[in-house]
Structure formats: C-alpha cells, structure tokens
Image: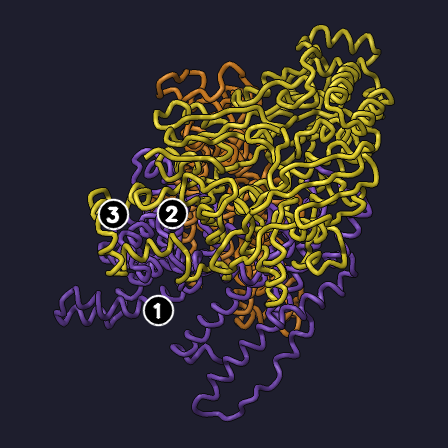
Chain colours: A yellow, B purple, C orange
Amino acid sequence: MSFHPALTGRNVVQRQKNTRTKNKAGKLTMKKLTTLIAATALASLMATAAWSKTFVYCSEASPEGFDPGLYTGGQTFDAAAHTVYNRLVEFKRGTTEIEPALAESWEISADGKEYTFKLRPGVKFQTTDYFTPTRELNADDVIFSFERQYKADNPWNKYVPGASWEYFSGMGLPDVLDKIEKIDDLTVKITLKRPEAPLLANLGMPFISIVSKEYADKLQADGKMELMNQQPLGTGPFTFVAYQPDAAIRYKANPDYWGGKQAIDDLVFAITTDAAVRAQKLKAGECHLMSYPNAADVAELKADPNLQVSEQAGLNVAYLAYNTTIAPFDKVEVRKALNMAINRQAIVDAVFQGAATVAKNPIPPTMWSYNDAVVDDKFDPEAAKKMLADAGVSDLKMKIWAMPVARPYMLNARRAAELMQADLAKIGVTVEIVSYEWAEYLKLSSAKDRDGAAILGWTGDNGDPDNFLDTLLGCDAVGGNNRAQWCNQEFDELVTKAKETSDIAERTKLYEQAQVVFKREAPWNTLDHSLAVVPMSKKVSGFVQSPLGDFVFEGVDIAE
Amino acid sequence: MTGGSKTFGPPVFQRKKGLAPMLRFIFGRLAVLIPTFLGVSLIAFSFIRLLPGDPVMLMSGERVMSPERHTELMNQLGLDRPMYVQYFDYLGGLLTGDFGSSIVTKRPVLDDFVNLFPATLELSLCAIILAVALGIPAGVLAAVKRGTWLDQTIMGSALVGYSMPIFWWGLLLIIFFSGYLGWTPVSGRISLMYFFPQVTGFMLIDSLISGQAGAFKSALTYLILPTIVLATIPLAVIARQTRSAMLEVLGEDYVRTARAKGMSPFRVIGVHALRNALIPVITTIGLQVGVLLAGAILTETIFSWPGIGKWMVDSVFKRDYAVVQGGLMLIAGMIMLVNLLVDVLYGLVNPRIRH
Amino acid sequence: MTVVETTKNPPTGIAEFWFYFSRNKGAVIGLAVFLIILFMAVFAPFVAPHDPSIQNREMLLLPPVLSEGGQASYLLGTDAVGRDIFSRLIYGARFSLFIGVIVVTLSVISGVLVGLVAGYFRGKVDTVIMRVMDIILAFPSLLLALVLVAVLGPGLVNAMIAISLVNLPHFVRLTRAAVMTERAKDYVIASKVAGAGTLRLMFLTILPNCLAPLIVQATLAFSAAILDAAALGFLGMGAQPPTPEWGTMLAEAREFIQRAWWVVTFPGLAILITVLAINLMGDGLRDALDPKLKRS
C-alpha cells in the first residue's frame, strides 16, 4: 500500500506517460515524438523505447525488501544493493577482484588489523520524490551503515520487527570488528580484533551497502523508519521509483551518479517466478534479459536468432559429503571407491542437461588459487569394486540424503540421488534415498552422528577461497557447515595460515596445497560446478555476468 | 470450543414482529461465528507451530548458525515463549487488526493481503461471471433440448470440465495459446510498458482510469487464460445445476399450464421456469467461493498471478510462519463472512429457514 | 451390505440397480474405462512394457511413437532420465486408485461414525461436532490440505490423511442430516419401542437407510481425492519423486513444458480420464439410487 508512486513531482516516467495521454500542452511540445509514436505501433514496447530507453529484466523472485543489510536473498541484492546502493569497495564487473567504489583508496596496517579508507569526494545521494538530500556522502554515512548492523543501542538496529542483519553476523563481522571511527569527513578507520585477510572481500558484499544518514535521520524524525526498507535511497546508478508487489520494480537512471549517468533511462524488474515463463517472455520480447533458465530450455534459447546466451562457471560446488567419523566411511579407500563408482558426468547430463561441469576440487575453477594440477578420481566401477573388497567391505548398505529443494549448484538432488543409487548398485552397494523438509535437512545433515552421505553444496559469498575451504572443511565447522565431519590437521593448518596472511601469492600457494590434501583424503565426492547461464536479447550490450551470481545492470545498453 | 454453546444465549431483541426476527437470525448467526473464529485461530496458530524445522534455520540456509545466535533470533521473534503466551498474544493482536509480520520480508501480513487480494478478487469475479454467463444458458439449453445430441454434448463437456485437473489444463492452454500460437501473454497482470498507480487494485478498472491507450486491452489479454482455467469447474457445476433445476421446474404444473395456454416457449422458459430454477443455482454460486479460492491457489501458481493464492503457496514453501498463519485467518474469516452473507440473503428470500 | 431387514425383495435389488444404471450409457462407458484402469493397475508388472524406475540413459526425453524420432518400444516417450512414460503411467494408476480407496474409506468410516453420533444424540455433542466441522469448512480445502501436509511432512501417506480430513465434513453433514430424517420415522420408533439398543438402532436400523446418498457422495469423494492428491503432488507436497504418481510426474515435467510436450500432456490426460470415468459412474449411480430414495 505504501508503494504507490506520487502522481506529481519529479517522476520522469510518470510525467512522460501523463504527457502522452492527458496533458494537452505537453502533447504540443512533444509533437514530434507523438507523431513518431503514432507511426509505430502504439502499444508496443518499442514505443516506450522511443520515449526513453527501458530495460526490462525478468527476475526470478520478489525482493524480500529494499534494505540489503536485512536479507540474504540474491534477488534482494539485485533489486536493492546493485541498483540503488554502492559499497566502500566493490567487485570489478565480471570478476571477484576488489576495486575502489565509494572509497577511493585504502591502506592496511602492517599487522593487518587497521584499515583506513579514503572516501571519494563529491558523491551525491539520489534525489527522489520522497527525499531531497542536502549534503554529499561523508564519513558519518559510512559509520552509520556499519553501526546500525551491530550496535544494539543504535535506534536502527531493530527498526523492522525481526531485523537480524543475517549476513553481517554470518560473515563473522561482530567477532572480528573492534571499532569504526571517523578520522575526518572523508576518512574512516576500521580496527579489527585480529588480522582477517578476507575482510576487503566481505566489504564488497551487498549487505554492507552505504546508506544515507541524512535520509535515515529524517525518517526517524518523521516516525516512518520502516520506509528505509520500502523506499531506498543511496548513491547507486539507479534511483528507485516504485515497487508493485510480486509484479514489478521500477527504477530510473540516476542523473547524478558519480560513475556517470547510465545509457538506459529506465530499468524494470519484471518478477516472474516460473523459469519456463521467463523464457517465454524473453522469446516474446517482453523482457531483455532473464535469470536462471531451466536447464531444459537452454538449447532452445540458444537456437533463437533473436537471443544471445552468456555462460560462465558459477561460483559454487555441489558435493556428496560422507560422514567421515562413521565406519566404514572413516576409511579413505572406501570413500575413494564410492567416488569412483559414481558417474558424475551422467548426473551433469541428466540434471543440468550439460549446463554444469564435473567438479574435482572443492572450489570452482573461476576462483583464484584453483589447483588445476589435482588429478580427479576416474569413473571405474570395476576398480571401485575391487577397492571395496580390498578394504574388507562387502554388502554395504548406505543412505544418501537428497535435499528437497532446487539450488543453483544442484537443480534436482532427488534425480542425482537416483542416478547414484543405480551406479552404486552395480558395485554391490545398496542405497536408500532419504529426504527431509528443507529446514530439517539443514539441521539434521549437520549432526555429527548423521547416518549416511548427504548431498549439499555452497555458493560463494565473496569470492575468497577461505569462504569455501575453511568455512566448509575446517575443523571449527565440524558439527556445523562441515557436513563431512572431517577434521584433518594438515588441511586445517594450511587454511588457517592462509586466512591470517594478507599476501595473495602466499595465500594461493597454501590453498593449492590444501586442495591436494583434500583430494587425497576424499571427504566429499565433488559433484559439479553449475554453469550460470544468462540468456538475453541480441539488442543487449554491456552486460557482464558476475561470478558471484549477481545481476548487475550498471553499464548495460540496448540497441534501438 | 466447548464454550461455544454458551453463546447461544437469548438475543438482545425480543420483539416478535417487524425486523426483529431477522435481526435475531443475523445475531444468532454472528454468535455462532465467534466460537468458529476462535477455533479457526487456534488451528491456524497450532498448525504453524507444528511445522517441522524452525524459521530461523531457514533464514540461514546452507550457512550453519551458531547455537547462541539461533537462541538469540528465536528470542527476538518471540518463538521461545510458551505456546499459550504466544497464542494469547496473537489473539490480542488479531483484535487490534494486527495479523503479525512476515518473517521473510518483515512486512505486516495485513498490508500484503490488502495489496494482493484485489488481484485474486478480480480474477475470481471474472471467472464467476464467465461461469454464469456460459453455464446458465448452457444448462437451460440442455434442459430444454433434453435427450438430444445437444444435451449430451453440453452435459458431456460439463462433466469433462468438472473432472478437469485445472493445473494441467492451465499448462495445456499455456503451451497452446502462449507458446504455439503466441496469442496470449504467459503470465502477469498487464504489459510492463503500462505503469499507473493502483487505485482500486482491479487492473481492468485502473487501466481505464489511467487513460493510457491500450492499457485496458493489455490487461484483458493477460486475464483471459487464468479466467478460463479458474472458471472451468464452476462453469461445469453451474451448467449441471441449472439443467437439473430447469428440468424439475419444467415438470411443474404451472409451467405445463402456461404451455398449454399457448404461451410462447421462449416466455415460458425465460420468464417462468428460469426464474424459479435460478434460486438453487444462486445458492450454488454462493457456495463456489471456497471452490474459487482453492482453484485460485493452483491458477495463480501456474500463471504467476500476484494474488493471495500464490502468496499462500509461496509462504508455505518459505516456511513463513507468520504469513501462513495470518493468511489462513484472513481467508477463513472471509469465507465465513461470505457464507454468513449467503445465509442472511437466503433467509431474507426464504423466511422459513430462519426457524 | 446388510439391507435384508429393510429391503422387501433383496434378489431384485441388484437387478433393479443394474437396470437403472445401465440405462445411462455414460455410466457404462465410465465403468468399462474404470475396469480397464483397474486391470492395468492390478496387473501393472505384466502390462507395463518397462520397469517404471529403469533409466535408459541413451533415451532421455524420447518423443512418443507417433512423433518424429519416436520408438515403438517407448509408446508415450521417455522422461528426463530415460524412464518409459507409459509404464510409469500404468504404475501411477496404482497410486491414484489406492489414494482414492484409502481416502474414501477413511473419510466415510470416520465421517459416518461422527455423523451418526451427532445426528442420533443431538444436543451439546452435536453442537460441538458441527462447530468443528464448520471450522474445517471455513478453510478452502486445498489450502487446508496443503498446510496440513506441510505440517505432517510431504509424502503420499500424509497427503491421504490430509485429504481425508478435509473431506470429512461432507460425510458428517450428510450422515447427520439423513439420520435426523430417519430418526423420526415410524420404523425407527417402532424398533425403539420394541427395545432395540442404541447401537443396534444406529447401525442396523438407521444407517442402512442412509446409504444411498452416502454411496453417491463416496464416488464423488473418490474422484475428488484423486484430483486433490494430484494437485498436492503438483505443488510438490504429495507423493515424492521418483514415485510415479501422476501429479508428481506433472510437477517434475513442468520444466520441460517448452521442450517436451509429452511429459506434460500424458500424466494430466491420465488424471482426466480416470476422474472422468469415475464421475460418469457416479452419475449413473445417482440415477440408479435416486428413484429408490424417492420411493422410501
């Protein structure tokens, strides 16, 4: 109810529409364009394009809200963080490399505990129907953006019921962060309790977007704090116009954007939850770009002469985690034998119709420090059978846990489990497939005494290998994210050391070594890295896929 | 719920004539509603607490949360208090119109409901209009031409419609009309090029108010397939009901007399028979509200129609406790009110049932 | 059925029934189709050309035999993991019929019991029972079933329980109404005076005379249960894959809506044909039982 755009004011889209239909005076001044419209089909999308370049993106889900700090959903980050907001540092488009954004430059102290950020001068906040800023970005905004997420006494810490700042605590910031101070108007210093090499990558993540303190103060004074989550206002390339729940989100290009005004004038997110429907809309020209096509539709979309399809290995991995604390899965030979008996290529074909690659390492190939020298287990049922027999295991019965939901790294765990079941039957292993409701699944699969091997996966948050290797396989994560319950001293020392080192070359070496240890010990069967496929109209240019799976529309353009 | 019988106490109005009996009837019905509503709230409340897996687990997804953090969040959401405290808190909220806030979006449930309900209402109204507009003439025709191939065709089609798995029917229509022929848009309520403020929430009306050329037509094309799908079952039910009601009336003496008197068949059927046959049919239409809402759940899911049916299904899957609970309450409350309205209207028409 | 006490000429009962039933051509066709489906379900292992769970990985998404590229051994084509759709549909018939039988049995037995109690004893018991039924009826049935299954955990058994529960009020109301009509009739009062006990009165005297509308309602519930279970399966809350339940197959097929029409079309068609056959039979049953109702 509160999302209705005002009828009057600076709303460009609105004014143009009104001009076209109601306002006679406006019609006269815009005579040429009106004629142009009459010449083309009145009701076609092209007509709008003549007025203003409108880019339509068929997105997969409604945003949870518009304050990126509060949520964890990718669709929310696409809709708020990458349009309306900026961060101190950001990922260079199409990479997981950090580059300056609202912070022009930064310095890290020798002990790795102090980070001093120099802010970009002259950055303007957006001017909208609901707020007109009077000052430019300064250190207060940055400090406010951090403090509201972890200081319980900050009035904004609980400004919506159940606000939990999930990512802020999920990335461990409350444990690491000591203080954040203003040095001068354009300088901010962050002090850590201990060195933490992945911090910069964390600061590039959507949740720590920089909001306007001035806007927040006004909302607070007006007693309308909840609007922060409904009418966002930031420094980003697009200005929020309106949200029609479960239908569409509208933005216009921010004319004052510090990176320059965008080539497109309007940006629309058409929320379309069904992937098949998104594909049809794209083919019908109702949108320019879509997210997450069905694997089954990709071939057809590629064949369409009006479309182009961009593909990139996603920053993810799907795995089958054995419980390495329970016999006989505590034996490396048994785990290796099972790995060799499962035809992962068949899974990639049947579940992803080829839109994935078989994984050999626990981190995806697009991530720095990926060790391509690691030799994968060969699919060899005969050898596997022999290995099992040599390990003294016969008539093995096991459970395979299949998650009940589709995730980007595993579209259909059930189907994958069925394939594994058939493969393992050939080496005399009887598999029972079990599944639980998703929340239960997450909880029960973490249990140290879990019976069976669990299918699960991970999508990288910040492009740092630590986010995979330590998070998923470190000793601290046993009973939690470490679903293999695997604690290997050698591996753990390598990743812990890498976390405390800021030198990238040094870290790369350590992580490469860790991958070798991982493969030797085989706590998981690494199943696949899915391919992120983005189909779009041939008219679209300048769209760069993000390895993190975000949809960023800065820099896109459409040909007439 | 055992306290329910107490609410049947003596009504406030004791006069015997005039409006009093009607008011008594209405108040009696309202009194029955209160225990039912309490029961509904208890069910909605307890169902949701019984869902396996707590919402806090889901919030974190693959990332496992520390037990301390888990406890903290449960506390923040008030989920760690005793059940009965939570229930009375919830009831208290209901009385002040507070249906809770979504765990996922943090938005008030009532706001979302009010926002999305017009979409469902628009679709349901169009479906029921289509069902009545086609179902009654079809039923009358079948009754008048009883036993002919026309009757058999109509009744055969009606039975097919009545047996239709509408979720599959919707997919077929999409494959054919949207995919193969490209005639209708695939999903949504209106083409994205039209953008105007929500006034009534009815896209057909709003598009007219906006005055934008082509907007109404666009809204209409988006509405066609979902309307057909949702209307299928009510249409079949109404056609069958009309036919049997008509057959009964056509057999009555006064109709035969009218016919014998040489009144034109059109007049006999149109004026005398139909008017009487419609009474049971209208009741049937009233009873279709629940059927429509159940149908809306499937139809909206297939067509990505942003209404409350899809909202509820999505919320069940997201384990959004608060929304499922609040949504169940609102939907059940609405159905109860509609049923009450049907009852009262029926009571007005037919005074005998008041006693 | 122990109709002996009340029906005057038992031998002609069935003949008379068949006389009325067979006058309705649709009902006979429905019965025939239903028997075919029943036969296929019972003898699925012999009828089905393939094992429903065997994956032929060389034949993923093979089109039906009459389409270009189809193969005679896969009559209706294969699904995404190379399973024969025709065989899966045949096995699926087992699930659908099973669901129908269980749901009807559960809801008829419990509904009739509760309805008998409410209608026979009246008073407070009746009020409470009817209030509870009102509460169940206040929710749209599919929504209630959906939430119930979400609570109990997705699966075939829980789907059946949920559907039985939402069906319950219809049987309770019907039984109660019938019992209340019958209770005041002379023959009941007569046997009461003759000293028949409560249970005897309820089950042996009154119940048999309320059977006709219950049978008709049970047929309706049978087909409705199949539809509801399929809808739940379609929403991902019914039988879980790889069970070849029709609604579940349809849900799995949704992602292929653009590419492989057959995986979407046939499961739905199977549901429609089965439900239609049962409804045709239901119409025939009503026609056959109605005149009896009128004469009693």
Q: Which chain carries label 2?
A: B
Closer-to-camera residue (A151/A324): A151
Tell me whether marks 1 and 3 sit on the same chain. Answer: no
Residue at image x 38%, y 48%? B226
Residue at image x 38%, y 41%? B186
> Closer to the camera: disc 1 or disc 2?
2
First in sequence: mark 1 vs mark 2? 2
Amino acid at circle 1? Ile
Disc tally is: 3
Q: Quadrant of residue A487?
A: top right
Report the residue marked by disc 2. B192
Amino acid at circle 2? Leu
Mark identifier at residue B279:
1
Q: How crowded is mark 2: few (under 14 residues within 10 Å), some or many (20 or more)?
A: some
Report the residue marked by disc 3. A33
* x and y percentages locating residue C128 in the rendered image: 64, 69
Closer-to-camera residue (C36/A473): A473
On screen, residue B268 above or below A411: below
Question: What secondary structure is marked by label 3?
Answer: helix
Q: Is residue A129 visible?
A: yes
Q: Mark 1 lies on which chain?
A: B
